Amino acid sequence: MLNTPTTPGIVAGRLPANILAENFSDLHPPLTAHEALVAADRCYFCYGAPCMEACPTTIDIPLFIRQIATGTPEAAARTIFSQNILGGMCARVCPTETLCEEVCVREVAEGKPVLIGQLQRYATDRLMAAGGHPFARATETGKSVAVVGAGPAGLSCAHRLAMKGHNVTIYDGRAKAGGLNEYGIAAYKSVDGFAQSEVEWLLSIGGITVETGKRLGDGLSLSGLKSGFDAAFLAIGLGGVNALSMDGVNAVDMIADLRQSADRTDLAVGRNVVVIGGGMTAVDAAVQSKLLGADNVTMAYRRDKAAMAASEFEQDLATSRGVRILYNAAPKLVDDGAITLARTETRDGKLLETGEVVELPADQVLWAIGQTLEGAPDGVAVEGGKIVVGDGGRTSVDGVWAGGDCAQGGDDLTVTAVAEGRDAAEDIHAKLA
Amino acid sequence: MADLTSNFIGIKSPNPFWLASAPPTDKEYNVRRAFEAGWGGVVWKTLGEAGPPVVNVNGPRYGAIHGADRRLLGLNNIELITDRPLEVNLREIKSVKRDYPDRAVVVSLMVPCEEDPWKKILPLVEETGADGVELNFGCPHGMAERGMGSAVGQVPEYIEMVTRWCKQFSRMPVIVKLTPNITDIRLPAEAAMRGGADAVSLINTINSITSVNLDLFAPEPMIDGVGAHGGYCGPAVKPIALNMVAEIKRNAATADLPVSGIGGVTTWRDAAEFIALGAGNVQVCTAAMTYGFDVVKEMISGLSQWMDEGGHESVASVVGRAIPNCRDWQDLNLNYVTKALIDQEACIKCGRCYAVCEDTSHQAIFNRIDGVRGFEVNDAECVACNLCVNVCPVEECITMVETPLGEVDPRTGEKVREYANWQTHPNNPGAVKAAE
């Protein structure tokens, strides 16, 4: 091996292939059958369960856990999928520590929640591995719906519409369907090509056609969709990134490259990496830089710990992998292998620079400072950088719905996108009926 | 330090924990290991007649009921009495008793219900130096089909007859082991007493099918595609055993008959409960078959600590202490009023109390406190059934609080009155009426 973590500059092959494979293995290895039974037994089958209320897709969590406990994980999976067809991916990527598991009464009582996310994975893995699809389509309605964007919102919407008997065409600008499940999200949360196999499994319900390489403004127009289909659902995500005022790479691109890489020994990473940002994308970029073999990785966030969008669990994950988190540090200058950051403090709700600066060596600066709406069609009302939606995801344009990250509401999580896609499908179905 | 030594019908042991007649006591090797671990005594696995021994199945002999994390709650067995030659067992019993003179060695016996076989086997056992015999009138599987075990235990006249033979042909203490597969445990106990038994031991195992194989539609444990009922034991049977022991001790005819308590004793606490209900000692099987012989160390230390903390100087001083408080339902105070109280600090808001009260009981729990998720008892509906306490996952979170005498019960609107029971209740057609 030519390079090591301390090789100067941005280089590939800092770690041997076997170490890389280990580093990018499953963050939470799947539960064994016995582990699942033990974990399931801890569930109290709460009345009006707080976990269920905290789930954006309102999965009947106590029921599916009881189904696991009684030896019927396949039935558990059907309970999950009936509310959340991407329950497999959500089991892997949901920040359960801020959703269902945060409000689990056993978290409240003992600081140890029922392992809802891992149990969901156990059940969904079982059913998906068994082959076949758990739902059948209703009689064909003869109606057709266009879905723009094959991410979680689009896939969820398309599946529900197909189930109702409508014909769906999904358009996506990228080469593969899956959206952020395929191109975003840390590699260790979705191993073994799960995103693609989940898409294939979802599409196996039938009635859905996927056309890749097509996006609004590039081979597609809203008027074309309106005339060619009975309804349209926009799930175009946040395709743009906030412009960089200094040198560096967009963390989103770095993560996508990593997810699409066939051989991670080819991926170049700096010796000293600085990630700017405080969200999940920043954590994913920082942790993965470390796993690729960067010697020093620092996440710099301009506000304090409490304000950080990444959960406590994600922050702990980063620090446990050797990432240093620098709070109250705003980037000022990137120059000649170094970054200068201004120390900040919050006074009376305002973020102020203290006058103190820190300089860190930085061969590579990764920016994770937010994504923006791009390619929203003219005529669709946009407010605060998001498509305006009403009940059921209806946009300002008749016959056009929207959901997922591109639309108002939700927390820009996979699971909220799934919920919005599903609910829009129900609304579209009601309208088409 | 409390005195754990036991003197059960003249049989002395350093503690009241004996291993019951079962697979753990089938061989010298096992029994020596048991004594090294600290067991006070053993009842040697049941011996049969001289001659070709019984044979056992070579498929599964046990079936189990599991709780969380495969904790074994109940065990079922279809193993018969010892399948080793009589002379081998007798030789080993003699050897063990010689080396452990301070431990109790009682020998379980099961021979046909005729005078001659009993007359023959008793002197052989006596010759080993064993401390006593236990008559196996309990095993409900296999041997019962041949007119032995529970087939004898279900007929009080047979129990009396065989017990009398044993007392006649042996100078050894005789313990009669009773089967719970009957309707009234007092009758076989009385029969044993009439026959001259020095003690009874109970319970033996309960007729059971542990589960059904739903692929093959056959009961478990399954032998070559079919199954036979077995005998059920382990923690699950303890409540049944406790009641049967209490029934015998409450019965005037058998109140003074010594009892060796058996049935799901798993911890020192279980043992203490049997003793409080009148058992002079306890016998253990399933706990040893689940965890090995070392569990006796916890039983010894736990019983000892409890006795020290309670100021109980000897095992004998606590035997039967709970019996005066075991009564008939008709004696219970119908004017005693309690209300469930949920400790809001301890409550984790799982809502199980609400679900069971609302769906299956008296609609006496509110699920909102000041408009937010929270659980509170409605005293005006609470009948104090205790179900909420039983289903609450948090210990001591819900308690039953007594409504003092003279205070108004919000459910009835009446003041709590002095003790009165069903025997004098106005709704009881057979009530004892005060003289007019």
Image: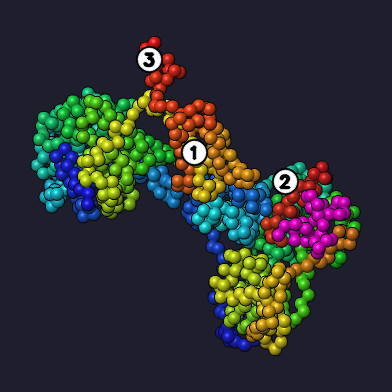
Whether residue A363 is visible, yes or no, is no
* Secondary structure of residue under mark 3: loop
Range shown magenta: A382-411
Q: Residue at x 43, y 31 (%)?
A: B405
* Secondary structure of residue under mark 2: loop
Asked whether, in this view, residue A231 is left or right of residue A107, the answer is: right
Q: Which residue is labeled 2 in the image?
A: A137
For discs 2 and 3, the disc positioned in front in the rendered view:
3
Q: Specify whether disc 2 shares its chain with disc 1.
A: no
Q: Quadrant of residue A30?
A: bottom right
**Residue A163: in magenta span:** no
Label drawn at residue B434: 3
Q: Distance from label 2 to label 3 (Cα)?
A: 77 Å
Q: Which residue is labeled 1 in the image?
A: B340
- The subunit carrying tag 2 is A
Q: Amino acid at mark 1?
A: Ala
